[in-house]
Image: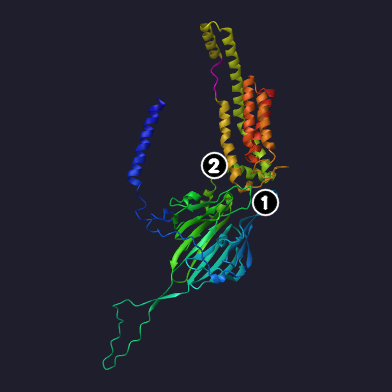
């Protein structure tokens, strides 16, 4: 059966199935005007969330000059610094091993003029409380607890923080109490009932009916800032994340943020290359809308709550920590989806797992890359050995054919007979083995590149001497130069004519130039792999394997 005879029916079957799915199932799920939790909508198109997005922040004027008192709370490999200015997180530091020694990384830093850059700031439509007081501080077995209280003329806010000591989580117990009462007059046309007097007793006068009162409605918003590492080497633009209706994490770029809102998202926050700040649990249903706000190159996830007229309390949980698989899964397995390494994500994750495993023994990610390269070379040895043999036989065959061409240049018929006899004797050699070995290494190359670029485990991980960060380019271009040298040595060692060697020489120069802008860890992998390839070729020739 021809290939065309298989492809045409398969394509027609796919088109029929797609058409039936669109016709019968494509329009089901969300009716017009209906929205589901986690659904992304345009505020100008959705009836339920067509209210304008609220970005403005206003504080009580008399509280703007209030003193700022700082309090620290120890979390899991982290330190939170809380401020009485907004009862928010003024600074968030993480302790990590960087460069072979313990260091600190900050994802939230003191805000300066922009008050909204503080973490978990709570604001309202009117003037919001800014000056809070620390009412209570206690140390629980599993968490550090701080309670802040602040007021504006319209609302009293209580913020109770639970900083976990075992996971990268922080819980916010938020209580909102409207302070203003709005009188509501009795409805017109209604007459209060009066008791019928007993026979012989005078009718008693009715007491005046008191008007019904209700609190002035208030609506809170929580600002969650995106993590921001103040490191010039990390060229990174934070992005938003949201859990969609299909229960999958959606990455939101700045281009897709304007006028977009998510209805009651279960997971909503922002990330950068190495860290994540996001809502992970909203047990009491506080969040009615989630959207993003940008200001002075800063990104914020805005969690908009319900309109309330009486004292109400909610508990919200947030993940604030590094993007490491084990830590993300310990809080919510769905968070592992933020570890997006592209098309070769499974290979990148496997590569990172192997590097972590090897690093546990050698305690250096550079040597772990060397060992991983050696392991890959050993696994590829049967393929590369067959490839070398195939290439050598191909060169021998080409040399014999060229000899025949020269010998029978004036006798085409005899040349054709001799060529057929040579092919019949040696057979047509299978080609593509060299390309196959190259293709097998491409996924590993891309996976390692993605792991080096996006994994916090390799951020500022040193190797030896001048290599202080495997995730960044070699500052002195030594490794890229060695890559070029290895390619040139292969060119000089490879049999063939001068033109083929010149081509390989040029390829080595081009590849060295490319490696100059790649991470040092990737250049190390290519360099070690190339020199191991030279050694392998020598061994195969020496022992005639």
User: Which secondary structure class fits the magenta region best?
Assistant: loop
Tell me if mark 1 has few (under 14), some (14-19) or many (20+) residues whose alpha carbon lies within 10 angstroms of its own: few
Q: Is residue 205 above or below residue 415?
A: below
Q: Do labels 2 and 1 touch, CB within 8 Å?
A: no
Quarter of the figure with the N terminus: top left
In magenta segment, residue 261: no
Nearer to the camera, 281 or 305 = 305
Q: Is residue 391 above or below residue 520?
A: above
Tell me if mark 2 has few (under 14), some (14-19) or many (20+) residues whose alpha carbon lies within 10 angstroms of its own: some
Q: Badge 2 is on which residue?
A: 346
Relative image position of residue 464 (x, y in whole percent):
72, 42
Relative image position of residue 43 (x, y in whole percent):
41, 56
Q: Residue furthest right?
A: 465
Q: Residue at x 39, y 27 (%)?
A: 4
Relative image position of residue 338 (x, y in whole percent):
53, 49
Residue 248: tell me if it is visible. Answer: no
Q: Which mark is residue 193?
A: none
Residue 226 falls in which quadrant of the image?
bottom right
Looking at the rendered structure, the number of numbered marks drawn on it comes to: 2
Q: Badge 1 is on which residue?
A: 97
Q: Is residue 391 above or below residue 229?
A: above
Chain part drawn in magenta: 426-431
Q: Secondary structure at mark 2?
A: helix
Q: Secondary structure at mark 1?
A: strand
Q: Residue furthest left?
A: 199
Q: Residue at x 40, y 58 (%)?
A: 50
Q: Residue at x 63, y 49 (%)?
A: 232
Q: Is residue 340 left or right of residue 75?
A: left
Q: Earlier in the sequence, mark 2 or mark 1?
A: 1
Q: Is residue 497 above or below residue 234?
A: above
Quarter of the figure with the C terminus: top right
């Amino acid at each position: 059966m021809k290939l065309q005879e298989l492809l045409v029916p398969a394509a027609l079957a796919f088109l029929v199935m797609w058409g039936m799915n669109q016709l019968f199932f494509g329009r089901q799920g969300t009716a017009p005007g209906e929205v589901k939790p986690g659904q992304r909508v345009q505020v100008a198109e959705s009836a339920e969330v067509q209210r304008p997005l609220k970005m403005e922040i206003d504080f009580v004027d008399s509280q703007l000059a209030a003193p700022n008192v700082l309090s620290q709370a120890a979390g899991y490999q982290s330190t939170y610094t809380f401020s009485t200015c907004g009862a928010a997180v003024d600074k968030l530091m993480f302790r990590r091993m960087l460069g072979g020694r313990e260091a600190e990384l900050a994802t939230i830093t003191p805000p300066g003029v922009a008050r909204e850059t503080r973490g978990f700031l709570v604001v309202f439509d009117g003037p919001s409380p800014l000056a809070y007081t620390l009412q209570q501080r206690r140390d629980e077995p599993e968490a550090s607890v701080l309670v802040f209280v602040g007021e504006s003329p319209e609302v009293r806010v209580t913020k109770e923080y639970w900083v976990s000591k075992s996971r990268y989580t922080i819980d916010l117990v938020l209580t909102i109490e409207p302070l203003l009462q709005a009188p509501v007059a009795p409805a017109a046309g209604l007459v209060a009932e009066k008791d019928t007097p007993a026979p012989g007793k005078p009718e008693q006068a009715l007491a005046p009916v008191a008007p019904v009162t209700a609190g002035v409605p208030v609506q809170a918003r929580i600002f969650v800032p995106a993590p921001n590492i103040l490191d010039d080497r990390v060229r990174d633009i934070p992005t938003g994340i949201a859990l969609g209706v299909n229960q999958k994490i959606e990455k939101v770029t700045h281009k897709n943020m304007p006028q977009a809102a998510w209805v009651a998202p279960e997971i909503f926050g922002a990330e950068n290359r190495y860290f994540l700040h996001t809502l992970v649990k909203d047990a009491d249903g506080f969040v009615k809308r989630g959207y993003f706000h940008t200001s002075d190159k800063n990104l914020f996830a805005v969690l908009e709550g319900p309109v309330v007229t009486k004292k109400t309390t909610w508990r919200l949980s947030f993940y604030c920590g590094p993007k490491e698989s084990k830590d993300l899964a310990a809080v919510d397995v769905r968070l592992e989806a933020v570890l997006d390494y592209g098309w070769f994500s499974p290979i990148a994750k496997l590569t990172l797992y192997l590097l972590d495993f090897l690093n546990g023994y050698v305690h250096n990610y550079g040597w772990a890359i060397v060992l991983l390269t050696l392991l890959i070379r050993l696994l590829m040895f049967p393929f590369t050995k067959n490839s070398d043999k195939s290439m050598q036989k191909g060169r021998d065959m080409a040399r014999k054919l060229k000899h025949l061409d020269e010998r029978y240049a004036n006798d085409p018929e005899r040349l054709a007979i001799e060529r057929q006899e040579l092919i019949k004797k040696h057979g047509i050699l299978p080609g593509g083995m060299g390309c196959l070995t190259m293709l097998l290494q491409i996924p590993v190359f891309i996976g390692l590149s993605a792991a080096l670029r996006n994994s916090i485990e390799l951020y500022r991980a040193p190797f030896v001497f001048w290599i202080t960060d495997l995730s960044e380019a070699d500052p002195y271009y030594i490794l890229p130069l060695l890559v070029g040298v290895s390619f040139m040595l292969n060119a000089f060692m490879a049999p063939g004519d001068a033109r083929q060697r010149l081509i390989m020489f040029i390829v080595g120069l081009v590849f060295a130039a490319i490696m100059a802008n790649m991470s040092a860890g990737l250049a190390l992998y290519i360099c070690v792999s190339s020199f191991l390839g030279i050694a392998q070729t020598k061994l195969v020739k020496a022992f005639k394997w």
